[in-house]
Image (tube, grey):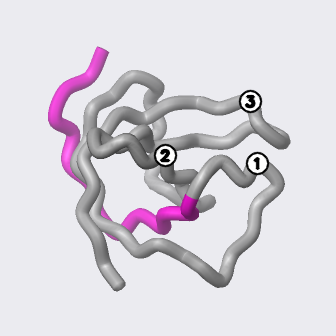
Amino acid sequence: MSITVTGTIQRSDMGAGTWALAADDGVTYEVYRGAPKELLKSGQKVKVKGQVREDVMTAAMIGPVLEVQSFEVISSD
């Protein structure tokens, strides 16, 4: 199932370190590996279209794993 989420990109030190999307609705998504480097900028506000991967487990386990299909930068620090 494809979803669209708006939020802020954050770097998390959980596990070996990972990227997260703190969504405006309060949910924190772990950004799945292979996301575009242009997306991975801490503090950047984005709108992401992607798929929640329920078949993936991670060491960080900070929230649902979101595989990014596309994104749009709303604002950056």
Q: Quadrant of the C terminus?
A: top left
Residue 24 placement (x, y as % from top left): 28, 39
- The residue under label 2 is 28
Taking the spot 83% from the left edge, 40% from the top edge, the residue there is 16
Badge 2 amino acid? Thr
What number is the disc on residue 23?
A: none
Taking the spot 44% from the left edge, 43% from the top edge, the residue there is 21
Q: Are marks 1 and 2 in contact (CB under 8 Å)?
A: no
Taking depth in this image into account, of 28 and 21 the one nearest to the observer is: 28
Residue 76 placement (x, y as % from top left): 26, 22
Secondary element under disc 1, as helix, strand or loop, is: loop
Alpha carbons under labels 3 and 1: distance apart = 8 Å
Q: Are marks 2 and 3 in contact (CB under 8 Å)?
A: no
- The residue under label 1 is 60
Alpha carbons under labels 1 and 2: distance apart = 12 Å
> Within 10 angstroms of label 3, few (less than 14), some, or many (20 or more) residues?
few
Where on the picture, by quarter, is residue 64? Answer: bottom right
What number is the disc on residue 13?
A: 3
Residue stretch in magenta? 64-77
Q: Earlier in the sequence, mark 3 or mark 1?
A: 3
Taking the spot 69% from the left edge, 75% from the top edge, the residue there is 56
Alpha carbons under labels 2 and 3: distance apart = 14 Å
Q: Earlier in the sequence, mark 2 or mark 3?
A: 3
Badge 3 amino acid? Asp
